[in-house]
Image (cartoon, rainbow, N blue to C red):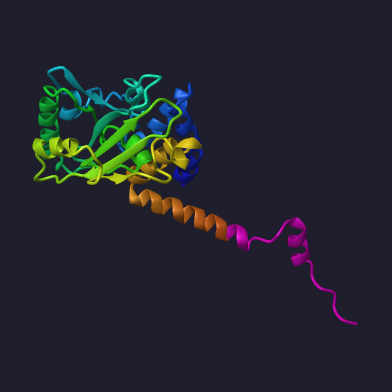
């Protein structure tokens, strides 16, 4: 019964905690979710002190490093190599990967191919910047972008406030090789990719412009981690409350009028 009220009240506090000093609210909400065995992304609990980072995100091959994008650093990381007076975009290849929770253990092949492609990119005169996101570790970020695992995203970064072109392509989880990724870059066009438009564009979408992308990411993440039986209890509680209020008389005057006997006819 307490679940529904607590979850609704905690949502705005949790969203504000992503970019504000109110970390105590985040900790309180973690205590609440802890009863379901769930941890808020970015909150280190006594049961989860070991850093979990995908092999693709931690790899450093030669002089080219695969950056790890998180909810806190992704924008700064993507803008880091962009010069203020640049007219040509800095290109990023970002692998959206995951573990058992979000990719069901099927992303190992594409991660290996991505690592190997980075090693080959490192010896080329021209190559993209590279990064990776693990949706097991960054579910809020993946939900705020509506990004699915096993996909390759391409960001063409220009100085702010220039619009940013973002493309994505679903990679084959069983047959992708490093040569496939190198061939995509060698084509020097985006015919094999989909241009991202609309609400979920990380930079120019309506959700990002109005500051709603991260709150929505938290909301979608919470909907995924809350057990179905708890959701049913919350819906049942709300429906019963609404039905009881609808059936109740409108105010004490109505109750008194309903209770008073009607005078007998003369």
Answer with the quarter of the image where residue 193 lies. Answer: top left
The magenta segment is 244-266
Judged left or right of residue 184, residue 204 is right
Residue 100 screen position, x and y as percent? 18, 40
Question: If the image is split into quadrants, where does the C terminus sit?
Answer: bottom right
Q: Quadrant of residue 162?
A: top left
Residue 78 coordinates in the image, percent (x, y) = 33, 26
In the picture shown, does residue 10 fall above or below 84? below
Toward the viewer: 53 or 22? Answer: 53
Residue visible at 43% across and 26% down in the picture:
160
Q: Which is nearer the eye, 42 or 202?
A: 202
Residue 10 visible here: no
Which residue is found at the position 50% from the left and 57% from the top?
239
| Residue extending furthest toward the bottom | 266
Residue 258 image offset from top left, x and y in percent: 75, 66
Quadrant in the picture for residue 116: top left
Left or right for 210, reference 27: right
Query: Which residue is drawn at the image coordinates 24% and 40% (left, top)?
Result: 189
């Amino acid at each position: 019964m307490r679940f529904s009220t607590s979850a609704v009240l905690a949502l705005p506090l949790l969203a504000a905690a992503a970019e504000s000093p109110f970390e105590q609210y985040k900790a309180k909400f973690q205590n609440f979710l802890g009863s379901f065995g769930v941890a808020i992304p970015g909150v280190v609990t006594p049961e989860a002190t070991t850093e979990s980072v995908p092999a693709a995100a931690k790899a450093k091959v030669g002089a080219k490093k695969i950056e790890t994008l998180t909810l806190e650093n992704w924008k700064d990381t993507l803008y880091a190599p962009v010069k203020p007076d640049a007219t040509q975009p800095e290109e990023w290849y970002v692998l959206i990967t995951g573990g058992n929770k979000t990719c069901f253990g099927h992303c190992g092949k594409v991660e290996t191919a991505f690592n190997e492609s980075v090693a080959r990119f490192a010896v080329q005169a021209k190559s993209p910047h590279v990064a990776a996101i693990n949706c097991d570790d960054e579910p809020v970020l993946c939900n705020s972008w509506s990004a699915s695992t096993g996909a390759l995203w391409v960001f063409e970064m220009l100085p702010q406030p220039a619009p940013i072109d973002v493309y994505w392509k679903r990679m084959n989880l069983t047959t992708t090789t490093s040569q496939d990724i190198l061939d995509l870059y060698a084509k020097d066009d985006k015919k094999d990719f989909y241009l991202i438009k609309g609400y979920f564009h990380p930079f120019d979408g309506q959700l990002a412009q109005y500051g709603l992308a991260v709150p929505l990411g938290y909301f979608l993440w919470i909907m995924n981690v809350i057990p179905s039986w708890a959701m049913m209890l919350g819906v049942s509680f709300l429906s019963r409350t609404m039905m009881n209020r609808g059936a109740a008389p409108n105010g004490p005057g109505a109750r008194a009028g309903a209770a008073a006997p009607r005078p007998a006819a003369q």
